[in-house]
Amino acid sequence: AYGYGGDLSASIDNLKKAISLHPTPSAYYNLAVALSKVGSLEEAVNYLKLYLENPEGEQPEKVEAARQQLQGLEKMIRR
């Protein structure tokens, strides 16, 4: 919810806390998106990889979009 209001740092902190208590694919994905928005690309890549390791219950379109995001971020990091 914080991310929609523009407070990405609070959103990132809360997602990390939530993941430490109960990691879910959705939380990994949301954290990766927030991290990429603030420029923490390596960390975003790590969380996208965690998301893709076990995307149980996620929509196939979202999983494919995450794969594409991962490829894009990895290209950006290599530059």
Image: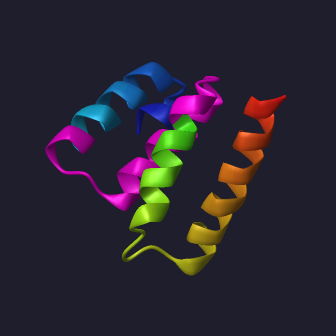
Q: Is residue 9 left or right of residue 79?
A: left
Q: Residue furthest right?
A: 79
Q: Residue furthest front?
A: 78
Picture layout, residue 59 above or below residue 31: below
Name the residue: 37% across, 77% down. 57
Q: Is residue 76 left or right of residue 17?
A: right
Q: Is residue 72 left or right of residue 20?
A: right
Q: Residue furthest left?
A: 21
Q: Dividing the image into 4 quarters, which one contains the N terminus?
A: top left
Residue 72 percent location from the top left of the image: 76, 47
Q: Dividing the image into 4 quarters, which one contains the C terminus?
A: top right
Pick the front one: 72 or 22: 72
Pick the front one: 62 or 74: 74
Residue 2 percent location from the top left of the image: 42, 32
Residue 38 highlighted magenta (yes or no): yes
Residue 13 quadrant? top left
Provide the major secondary structure of the magenta segment: helix
Residue 60 percent location from the top left of the image: 56, 79
Range of the magenta residues?
A: 19-43
Residue 48 highlighted magenta (yes or no): no
Picture layout, residue 46 above or below residue 11: below
Name the residue: 49% across, 34% down. 3
Picture layout, residue 32 above or below residue 53: above
Residue 25 quadrant? bottom left
Picture layout, residue 64 above or below residue 38: below
Name the residue: 50% across, 52% down. 49
Colouring of the image = rainbow
The number of callouts visible is 0
